[in-house]
Structure formats: structure tokens, C-alpha cells
Image: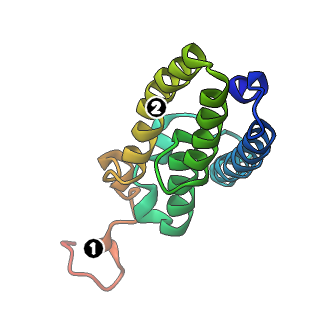
Amino acid sequence: MLVAFLASGSSAPVAVTFYLVAYFITTLIAFGTIAVLSENARDAAALDDYRGLAWRRPWLAAGFTISLLSLAGIPLTAGFIGKFYVVMAGAESGLWLLIGALVVNSVIGLFYYLRVVATLYSLPSLVAAVPAPGKLPWSHPFSLKPH
């Protein structure tokens, strides 16, 4: 956003406004998802808290994925359009060094966002998939078990 603030062209105010609105909405969705997944006793702060979320709660995982991809600046998302406007405003003013820093930071951030997205769609861990004792499918009162 510093690039758009320092730009002096006519597209700078539009770039700042769109960037702020887009990132406000996507950040609100991302942190809203984290709040929904957090419990009273413990926050969902570890990466394993999101493992297999797409299999347990697909709509929540889809919204979280879209917001993370937007924050990463993946094309066809509001985050990409916001970054594009910022780059265009910087190019009008010749802020090439700051544009380069923006691109490098976006690539670094992409690694972290895609890591979370990959975790959302990975298979749930085996520890979480094992039922508690007494809750096994064959422990039904009418099941065939040795006496």
C-alpha cells in the first residue's frame, strides 16, 4: 500500500481505496473463519487445526480458501486486482524499486498462504480419525462380539 500512497498519479487514490476495501473484506473472512474454528478453551492457531477442514466443513474451507488466495494475490481475486491497481499507480510514478519489493514480498507471502490452503485439503490426521474407546463401530449393543 506504500507504493500507492507514494504514487502521485491520478490512479493512486483509486488504488488505495480498492486495495483497502478488498483486503478489509478478505481479512475479515479469514479471521472470521479462525474465530469460528476456535473454541472457548483454545484458539485454532496451529496448522494441524486446519488439516482436513475441507472434508469436515467444505463451505467454511471454500470461503477460507478464497480469502487466502485473495490475500496472496492470485489472479481473478479481489486481492490480485488491488495489487494490480497498486502496481499500476506505482508504475505511473516510476516507483520501480518499491514495485520490486512488492513483488518479492508477494511471492514470499504466497508460500505461507498456499501452505495453509494445502493443509485445508489434505487428509485428516490418523490420530483425529481414530474413534474414542467405546465408540468403535463394532461396539454396538447388537454387534457380534465374543463374551
Could you say whether the residue bearing mark 1 is in a helix, strand or loop?
helix
Q: Which mark is residue 112?
A: 2
Identify the amino acid type marked 2.
Tyr
Furthest residue in direction bottom, as rendered: 142
Q: Amino acid at mark 1?
A: Trp
Crowd around label 1: few <14 · some 14–19 · many ≥20 (10 Å)? few
The picture places residue 36, in percent across and down from the top left corner, at 68, 55
Write the residue at 31% across / 72% down. Answer: 137
Q: Where is mark 1, residue-wise?
A: 138
Q: Is residue 2 left or right of residue 129?
A: right
Residue at (64% x, 42% y) in the render: 85
Relative to residue 49, is residue 141 drawn left or right? left
Number of numbered tags placed on the structure image? 2
Residue lying at 50% horizontally and 29% vertically, measured from the top left? 106
User: Foreground residue, 135 or 10?
Assistant: 10
In the rendered image, which quarter contains the C terminus?
A: bottom left
Closer to the camera in the image, 128 or 24? 24
- Percent coordinates x, y for residue 74 in the rendering: 47, 47
Above or below — where is 87 with respect to 147? above
35 relative to 103, above or below: below
- In the displayed structure, 20 sits above or below 90; it is below
